[in-house]
Amino acid sequence: MLNLGVLASGRGSNFQSILDEIEKGNLKAAVKLLVTDNPGAYAIERAKKHGIEHLVLRPKDFPTKDSYYEKIAEELKARQVELVILAGFMRVVRAPLIEAYRNRIMNIHPALLPSFPGLHGQRQAADYGVRISGCTVHFVDEGMDTGPVIIQAAVPVAPDDTEDSLSERILKLEHRIFPEAIRLFAEGKLCVEGRKVKIAGYRPHDAALINPPLT
Ligand code: GRF
């Protein structure tokens, strides 16, 4: 059983997708703690509903940014958390937490990294006019959305897509690949070698998404 700690700032639909997979018995994990920087986060309601402890920790209540992340690392360690999940945590995590959980922090980003890092990945992709975008689960390092990639999923982008329509399409895949990445970790199948994540038992496939489709 893998002990998870979740950090979320808002709605928490990715948090919910992980809870759902645990409850269905598809993911051998337990969420030990939700940490949020936002007292109004809907993620808190989800934690309460599932009997999960939550802490509201706000950076402004700490003397430095580093001391904020030291505190989060301390609270996670105190609950024997083994893997930290950034599920819509709208901050760049700093060294004290990254060093305490090196290659044991996962983030989901709503674009195919390294394209469109930072805020509003979906809006950036729609505005750029790419034909394919998607989402990425990656380990977290010191950069902004730069850590080793674990899983990506792609969706077609239409010329008239908006940030909202594309976000909706991408979110459905986020809810599938985030629990899957955690499952691979829980089963001991992930190994980080430099920038690359090796996946035990990975079988290559040649499925292609071409957009617009060939005529
Ligand atoms: C998602 O789009 C995720 O990719 C990004 O933040 C959003 C969080 O949504 N990192 P939710 O709070 O999980 O519903």
Image (spheres, grey):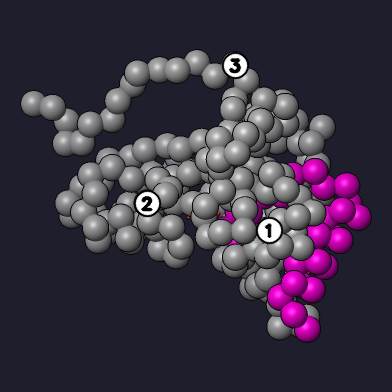
The three-letter amino acid code for the residue at tag 1 is Leu
Element carrying mark 2: loop
Question: What residue is pinned by disc 1?
Answer: 7
In the rendered structure, find residue 59 and report the number of the disc placed on it: none
Residue 193 is a magenta residue: no
Q: Earlier in the sequence, mark 3 or mark 1?
A: 1
Range of residues picked out in magenta: 63-89
Residue at left offset 68%, top offset 71%: 37
Sequence-earlier tag: 3 or 2: 2
Quadrant of the frame with the C terminus = top left
Label 2 CB-ligand 1 distance < 8 A? no
Figure quadrant of residue 153? top left
Question: Can residue 66 be spotted in the picture?
Answer: yes
Which of the numbered marks, if any, corresponds to residue 201? 3
- Distance of mark 3 from mark 2, alpha carbons? 28 Å
For mark 2, what is the residue? Answer: 115
Extreme residue toward the left, this view:
215
Q: Which of marks 1 and 2 is nearer the N terminus?
A: 1
Tag 1, which secondary structure?
Answer: strand
List x then y, in percent, for residue 159: 17, 51
| Quadrant, the N terminus | top right
Question: Could you say which is closer to the camera, residue 163 or residue 75?
Answer: 75
The residue sitting at 60% across, 65% down in the picture is 92
